[in-house]
Image (cartoon, rainbow, N blue to C red):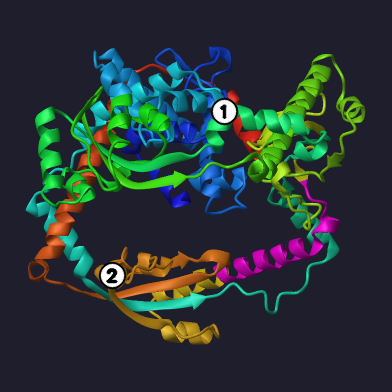
C-alpha cells in the first residue's frame, strides 16, 4: 500500500487518477467529514491555484484517508511514519496542487464535461448501489449526509477528475519507441557483469561503553530521534443499550404489535428472482426464445455480457419485487411456477424479462409462536428509544453549558480515562494499554479538540452505541527522558560509533584498491571476510522477483575496472568492483526486445504528459502559504508547539 502511494506521488501523470482516488476515499467513508476538495479563506489556504484556494482541511483529509488505507496493511503506522515514507507533506500538497492546475488549465481553455457523463461516473460508484445492486439515489444521499459532503462537492470533484483525464489521457498514450532507442536498453538487460563484492560490517564489538558525559551529549545532539508526538488523555462515558433500563413489554403491547404486523405472521410466499433488462422488445423476445429453446436463464444472460451479480434481484415478496422492478413484473413473476420465465415486460429502462429461480412458502404463525420474537423486538425498540432520549438529554445539557463531569454525574454515566494516547491509539507510557473499539472510534474526534473545548457526543457504531467525549489534557510533543530510554540511547550511540568505524574502514579499503591493491589482499589485511565473486545479468535479477541488493545496483552503474562503495542499512558498507562485461545478443531474445519497446513506449508517453503538465503549471497562477504548510505538517505529526 505504501509503495502504491509512493508511485502515485512520484509522477505528474498520476495526478490524472489522484482525484478519483480521493473521491473514492470520501464515498467509502474514510475521508474527513467536512473536508472539501478545495475551499476556505485565501488567508488560511495552503495554496491558491488559479484563484481557487486549497484548504488545510482538504490536505488533512487526504493525508488521513491515505494513512487509514495504509494502516489496513500496516496497523501500527503513524502519521509521522507515513509522511516520512512518502517524502513529507509537501509532496502531497504539490501533487494536490498539480491536480488542481490541470483542472483549472482545462477549464480556462474551454474544455468542459457533459452533465450526463458526470452522472454516469456517479452512478458507477460502488458505494452508491442500493439493495438491487444498481445505483440508488437514496443510498447516495444517505452516505453523503453521513460524511457531511454536499452533493455539489462530489459533483465538482468528479467533474475536475474528468477534465484531468481529458487532458492527460491522449498525451500519455504509449507510443512506439524506435529500434535505435530500444536495442541499447534491451542489451543492458542481458549483458553479464562480473566482479567482486566485499562486506564491511558495522558491529559494536571492541567499542568501549560510553561514559555518562558521552551518553548525555549524544542524547542532546539527537533529541529529535527520541521525540514522542503530541498525546491526548481522553475521557469518555459510554451511552448505549447497556446503560439504560426499560420495562419489559406488557401483554397488551405484545398483542398490539402482533396485530399491527399481522401480514408478517400470516401465510406468505417469496420468490428468488433473476431479471435482465434489454434495450428493445425484439431483443427481449429473442432472449425469451433462447431460454425456451433449452438455454438456461443464467447462460443466456452471460451470452449477453451480463454477470451473475447483474441479474440477481434476490428473494422478494410481491410488494418488494414491485418496488425493485415494477408492478407489472411482480404480477408476471408471481403468476409463474418455479423455473418459469416471464414474457417481455416494459420498464423505464427498456424491456425486462424475469425468471423464478425458487419459491419459498411460509405458514401462518400464532401469537404464542412468535411471543418471544415480538418481546425481543419491542424490548430493543424501547432500549433504542431510551438511548435516543438519553443522547438528546446529554446534548441539551452540553448546549446549556454543562461540563463533562456535570453531564456524566447527572446521568450516572461511568467515566473512563485513558493514558496519554498517540493518534493511532497507542500509549507510549503504558505499553500494555490496548485501545478497545470505543477508544478507537473516538481517536479521530479527539484529535481535533483540546481540554478547553466543550464535550461532544460521538457515534461509536450503528447499533445505538454512543460516547460522551472530552479531552482531559494534551501532552505536548517532547523527547522521552533519558532515564526512561537509557539502554536504547546507549545502543544507538554504540551503533553510531560502529557506523563511523565501518565508514572509515570502507574509505581506507576503497583508496587501497583504487591504488592497485587486490581486493582479497586488502580485506585480509583488515581482518574482514574475503570478498565474493559475482556474475549476473539484470534479466536474471528481474526473473528472481526479489528486490535488487544495493551492492548489485552499484555493480550495474560501474564501468569495467571501476570500484565504488555502496552503503547498507545499519551503517555497514559494501566495496564493489566490476571486472568485466560480457555482451549479450538481443537478437536472440525477440520477446525481450518487444517487451522493452512496450515499456519504453509507456515511459515516453508519461514523459510527454509530465512535460505538458509542467507547461500547464507555468500557465496557471499559483501562490503558496509556506507558514500554513509547515503548521499543518507539524499538527499532523503531533509536533506543533502548544498555543
Q: Please tell me the numbered disc located at residue 629.
A: 1
Asked whether 608 or 504 is in front, the reply is 608
Secondary structure of the residue carrying tag 2 is: helix
Residue 393 locus on image (x, y percent):
81, 21
- Residue 342, picture quadrant: top left
Asked whether 188 or 480 is in front, the reply is 480
Residue 467 locus on image (x, y percent):
76, 34
- Magenta region, residue range: 479-503
Q: Is residue 468 visible?
A: yes
Residue 328 locus on image (x, y percent):
28, 26
- Residue 471, picture quadrant: top right
Q: Is residue 259 above or below residue 289?
A: above
Q: Please tell me the numbered disc located at residue 335.
A: none
Rounded to the nearest whole Å, what is the CA distance between mark 2 and mark 1? Answer: 43 Å
Q: Could you tell whether 263 is left or right of 413 in the image?
A: left
Secondary structure of the residue carrying tag 1 is: helix
Q: Residues within 10 Å of mark 2 (few under 14, many from 20)?
A: few
Q: Please tell me the numbered disc located at residue 543.
A: 2
Q: Residues within 10 Å of mark 1 (few under 14, many from 20)?
A: many
Amino acid at each position: 500500500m505504501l509503495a502504491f502511494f509512493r508511485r502515485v506521488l512520484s509522477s505528474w501523470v498520476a495526478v490524472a487518477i489522484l482525484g478519483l482516488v480521493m473521491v473514492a476515499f470520501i464515498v467509502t467513508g474514510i475521508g474527513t467529514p467536512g473536508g472539501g476538495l478545495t475551499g476556505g479563506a485565501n488567508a488560511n489556504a495552503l495554496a491558491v491555484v488559479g484563484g481557487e484556494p486549497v484548504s488545510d482541511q482538504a490536505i488533512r483529509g487526504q493525508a488521513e484517508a491515505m494513512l487509514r488505507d495504509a494502516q489496513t496493511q500496516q496497523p501500527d503506522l503513524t502519521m509521522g511514519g507515513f509522511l516520512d515514507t512518502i517524502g513529507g507533506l509537501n509532496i502531497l500538497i504539490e501533487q494536490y496542487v498539480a491536480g488542481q492546475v490541470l483542472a483549472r488549465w482545462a477549464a480556462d481553455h474551454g474544455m468542459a464535461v457533459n452533465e450526463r457523463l458526470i452522472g454516469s461516473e456517479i452512478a458507477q460508484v460502488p458505494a452508491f448501489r442500493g439493495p438491487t445492486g444498481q445505483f440508488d439515489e437514496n443510498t447516495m444521499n444517505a452516505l453523503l449526509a453521513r460524511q457531511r459532503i454536499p452533493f455539489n462537492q462530489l459533483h465538482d470533484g468528479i467533474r475536475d477528475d474528468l477534465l484531468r483525464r481529458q487532458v492527460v489521457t491522449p498525451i500519455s498514450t504509449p507510443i512506439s519507441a524506435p529500434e535505435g532507442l530500444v536495442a541499447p536498453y534491451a542489451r543492458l538487460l542481458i549483458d553479464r557483469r562480473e566482479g567482486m563484492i566485499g562486506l564491511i560490517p558495522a558491529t559494536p564489538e571492541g567499542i568501549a561503553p560510553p561514559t555518562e558525559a558521552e551518553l548525555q551529549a549524544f542524547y542532546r545532539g539527537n533529541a529529535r530521534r527520541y521525540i514522542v508526538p503530541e498525546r491526548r488523555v481522553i475521557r469518555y462515558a459510554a451511552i448505549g443499550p447497556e446503560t439504560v433500563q426499560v420495562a419489559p413489554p406488557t401483554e397488551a403491547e405484545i398483542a398490539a404489535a402482533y396485530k399491527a404486523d399481522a401480514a408478517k405472521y400470516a401465510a406468505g410466499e417469496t420468490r428468488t428472482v433473476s431479471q435482465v433488462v434489454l434495450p428493445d422488445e425484439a431483443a427481449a423476445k429473442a432472449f425469451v426464445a433462447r431460454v425456451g429453446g433449452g438455454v438456461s436463464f443464467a447462460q443466456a444472460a452471460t451470452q449477453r455480457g451480463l454477470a451473475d451479480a447483474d441479474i440477481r434481484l434476490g428473494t422478494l415478496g410481491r410488494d418488494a419485487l414491485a418496488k425493485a422492478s415494477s408492478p407489472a413484473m411482480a404480477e408476471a413473476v408471481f403468476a409463474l411456477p418455479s423455473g418459469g420465465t416471464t414474457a417481455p415486460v416494459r420498464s423505464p429502462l427498456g424491456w425486462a424479462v424475469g425468471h423464478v429461480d425458487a419459491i419459498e412458502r411460509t405458514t401462518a404463525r400464532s401469537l404464542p409462536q412468535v411471543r418471544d420474537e415480538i418481546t425481543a423486538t419491542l424490548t430493543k425498540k424501547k432500549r433504542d428509544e431510551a438511548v435516543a432520549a438519553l443522547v438528546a438529554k446529554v446534548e441539551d445539557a452540553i448546549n446549556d453549558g454543562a461540563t463533562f463531569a456535570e453531564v456524566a454525574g447527572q446521568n450516572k454515566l461511568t467515566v473512563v480515562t485513558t493514558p496519554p494516547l498517540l493518534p493511532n491509539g497507542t500509549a507510549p507510557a503504558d505499553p500494555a494499554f490496548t485501545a478497545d473499539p470505543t477508544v478507537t472510534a473516538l481517536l479521530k474526534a479527539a484529535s481535533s479538540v483540546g481540554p478547553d473545548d466543550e464535550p461532544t457526543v460521538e457515534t461509536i457504531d450503528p447499533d445505538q452505541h454512543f460516547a460522551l467525549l472530552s479531552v482531559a489534557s494534551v501532552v505536548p510533543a517532547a523527547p522521552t527522558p533519558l532515564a526512561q530510554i537509557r539502554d536504547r540511547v546507549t545502543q544507538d550511540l554504540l551503533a553510531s560509533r560502529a557506523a563511523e568505524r565501518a565508514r572509515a574502514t570502507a574509505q581506507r579499503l576503497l583508496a587501497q584498491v583504487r591504488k592497485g591493491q587486490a581486493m582479497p589482499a586488502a580485506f585480509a589485511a583488515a581482518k574482514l571476510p574475503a570478498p565474493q565473486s559475482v556474475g549476473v545479468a539484470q534479466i536474471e535479477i528481474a526473473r528472481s522477483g526479489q528486490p535488487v541488493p544495493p551492492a548489485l545496483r552499484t555493480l550495474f552503474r560501474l564501468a569495467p575496472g571501476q570500484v565504488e562503495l555502496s552503503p547498507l542499512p545499519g551503517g555497514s558498507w559494501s566495496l564493489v568492483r566490476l571486472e568485466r562485461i560480457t555482451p549479450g545478443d538481443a537478437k536472440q531474445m525477440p520477446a525481450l526486445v518487444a517487451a522493452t519497446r512496450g515499456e519504453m513506449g509507456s515511459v515516453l508517453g508519461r514523459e510527454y504528459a509530465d512535460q505538458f503538465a509542467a507547461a500547464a503549471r507555468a500557465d496557471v497562477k499559483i501562490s503558496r502559504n509556506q507558514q500554513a504548510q509547515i503548521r499543518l505538517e507539524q499538527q499532523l505529526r503531533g509536533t506543533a508547539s502548544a498555543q
